[in-house]
Image: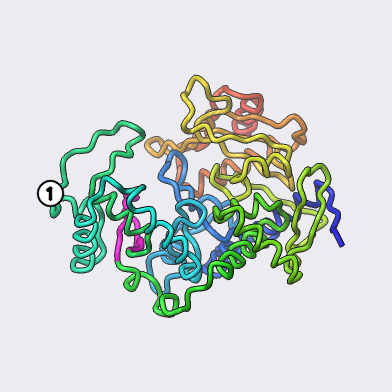
Amino acid sequence: MTEQLSRAQARRVALAAQGFLDPRHTVPTMRTFSRTLERTGVLQVDSVNVLERAHRMPLYSRMGPYDVGLLQRAAERRPRRVVEYWAHVQAFMPVELWPHMQHRMEEYRALRGKWWRDVPEDLVAQVLAEVRARGASTARALEPVLGDDAPRSKEHWGWNWSAARKALDQLFMTGELAIAARTPSFEPVYDLPERVLPAEVLAAPTPTPDEAARELVRRAARSHGVATAPCLRDYYRMGVEETRRAVAELVEAGELLRARVEGWDRPAYLHRDARRPRRVDARALLSPFDPVVWERERTERIFGFRYRIEIYVPAHKRVHGYYVLPFLLGDRLVGRVDLKADRATGRLLVKGAYAEPDAPPETAPELVVELRRLAGWLGLDADDPVVVEPRGDLAEVLARLLRSG
């Protein structure tokens, strides 16, 4: 039997799976955090800080204003609930996924000579020994010890890593080191896995490759609600063949249901426990790194919303702006805003604001409420904390509504 879903039903299923149906707590707690992480599965990490760190925004979009210390406690204090790894890309993931990443770590070990060919093996061994002896360390702390502390050029987006940083990255990717924390300037702090992860996680048996693939696809399906095979594969950046086998096995077990979605040109799969709400009353700004918009083809298929990140596009070629957030209202993406937190003046700058062609009349007033709330959460406390620049078809009405209070 194949489940039949309209496009609107698929949207609501997807948003419910991502946590937009969950009631918000007045004061979000660690319980709220855990529930939200269960929905998203992972939180992508990115260094861009023009508005707020990427891994913090999906939590805000679902939980509302929360204490960012919740995530820091979950990642850095016992009992650790999350740890960083290359799960989607660089991302926070639940600690219990560490054993399921062992095969991925083995693959990176096999690629040492290709990916890190300019990092001598004896240097890697020396870096590992230094961390073992010194404890949690940053690359900056190790560079003088290794005689590797010459100033770095800032060309090529700043990816001119020192040899120590490259060695630490290799050891992180192969699972010989883990990230224990981040400094205030976002530098990773590395340590041995046994000093980072709970003992029971490290003692857990390593799943077979097929078992690990099934678990990752299972989690991707829960986070998507309904998805095509490429969507399921992308969530944890898996291989085509391992995803195909896992999907087939989960269909056979009844965990995934075959589905057809209106307007989709590919077969879909519905998680058997996916909620099918009649209505979703969401209002949220979504980070460019939010799981709802990770897979651009999926975003366009579900929401009819064409979205591209323009951070790395030259300024004169950008269509909507540098750091553009889709605006979710109800169960639709109805607009987008280019935002910047100007912390020096305490203002949230709306550098561009655009409505989708079918945006409802309440788009602008609802967006004003959300912009004010975001400014408050970010601690932007100027007398007029939201400033709209005259770019985009929503800019004038937003500015007028903000002036009118």
Q: Is residue 361 above or below residue 277?
A: above
Toward the top, the furthest residue is: 316
Q: For residue 307, which quarter of the picture?
A: top right
Name the element at disc 1: loop
Q: Identify the residue at image location x=28%, y=33%.
A: 154
Name the side, left or right, on which 379 lies relative to 137. right
Residue type beneath disc 1:
Gly
Q: Identify the residue at image location x=83%, y=45%.
A: 262
Q: Between residues 319 and 371, which one lies in front from this camera angle?
A: 319
Q: Which residues are magenta?
A: 177-191
Image location (x, y in percent) of residue 7: 81, 46
Image location (x, y in percent) of residue 259: 80, 56
Of the 4 image quadrants, the one containing the N terminus is bottom right
Name the side, left or right, on which 259 lies relative to 181. right
Q: Is residue 131 above or below residue 169?
A: below
Q: For residue 370, which quarter of the picture?
A: top right
Q: Main secondary structure of the magenta part?
A: strand
Of the 4 image quadrants, the one containing the C terminus is top right
Q: Is residue 301 above or below residue 71?
A: above
Instruction: Read off the residue under disc 1.
Output: 147
